[in-house]
Image (cartoon, grey):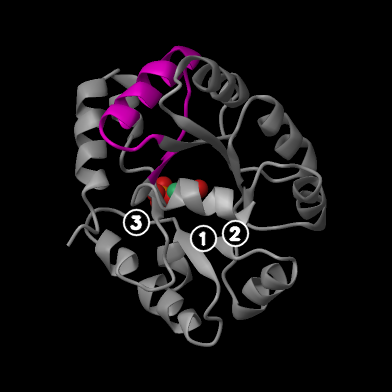
Amino acid sequence: KTETLLEILTGQPVIPVLKVERLADAVPLARALAKGGLPAIEITLRTADALDAIRLVADEVPEAIVGAGTILNGKDFNRAVSAGSKFIVSPGTTQELLDAASQSSIPLLPGAVTASEVMAMRDEGYRVLKFFPAEQAGGASYLKSLSSPIADMRFCPTGGISPKNANDYLSLPNVVCIGGSWVAPDDLIAAGDWNAIEALAAEAARLGAG
Ligand code: 3PG
């Protein structure tokens, strides 16, 4: 499962973190992001229609790789998998979530911040984690400090990341990709401005390229 997850996360520098308020926005949003060069997306379970949005994208946007985010428990893990999620993201971990993940073929990207949290996930067999909330927890310099003592763990930092600080993270040896909501801001989704979102995605897709 680590291999599957790494394949998804290393395919692009940025994973868009999405909040889909209107179900009708899900398909054009996923298409615009894929067209801009960001096929893998994380639809967060922060809205009532999130699971239906995942289902629609999984069914209707073959070029997208849809994942589910903000998964807080085993029940939501299983629901998100049933809806067609290709990967699951959680801000932290619980035993219930780990149990659900261990019974599934779909990979989990669990959140961790401290050295102890990272070591605990390492003992569970995880090698790729979400580092959240990245900026607030200590930023790129904090994450860099983990790379030497816990050298075989890699991260997708999210939280407070934008094009301004993206390369601070993308240049670290223990970062596989970053995540963020800036690629698809609420106002552009509300306005249905798919061209603007595609342009933001294209800009994000070039990050880290030097
Ligand atoms: C997440 O769940 O990864 C974050 O909410 C994304 O953080 P951002 O909105 O600061 O990009």
**Viewer-proximal residue among 38 and 19:** 38
Q: Tag 3, which secondary structure?
A: loop
On residue 132, the disc is 1
**Viewer-proximal residue among 73 and 126:** 126
Q: Is residue 31 magenta?
A: yes
Q: Earlier in the sequence, mark 3 or mark 2?
A: 2
115 over 170 or under it: above or below? below
Residue found at the very far bottom of the displayed protein: 149
Q: Amino acid at mark 1?
A: Phe
Residue drawn 24% across the image and 59% down it: 208
Label 3 beta carbon less than 8 Å to ligand 1: yes
Residues at marks 1 and 3, CA–CA distance in whole angstroms = 10 Å
The answer to whether the residues at label 2 and label 1 have Cβ atoms under 8 Å apart is yes
Q: Tag 1, which secondary structure?
A: loop
The answer to whether the residues at label 1 and label 3 have Cβ atoms under 8 Å apart is no
Residues at marks 3 and 2, CA–CA distance in whole angstroms = 16 Å
x, y (%) of residue 8? 48, 46
On residue 111, the disc is 2
Q: Amino acid at mark 3?
A: Ile
The residue identified by callout 3 is: 161
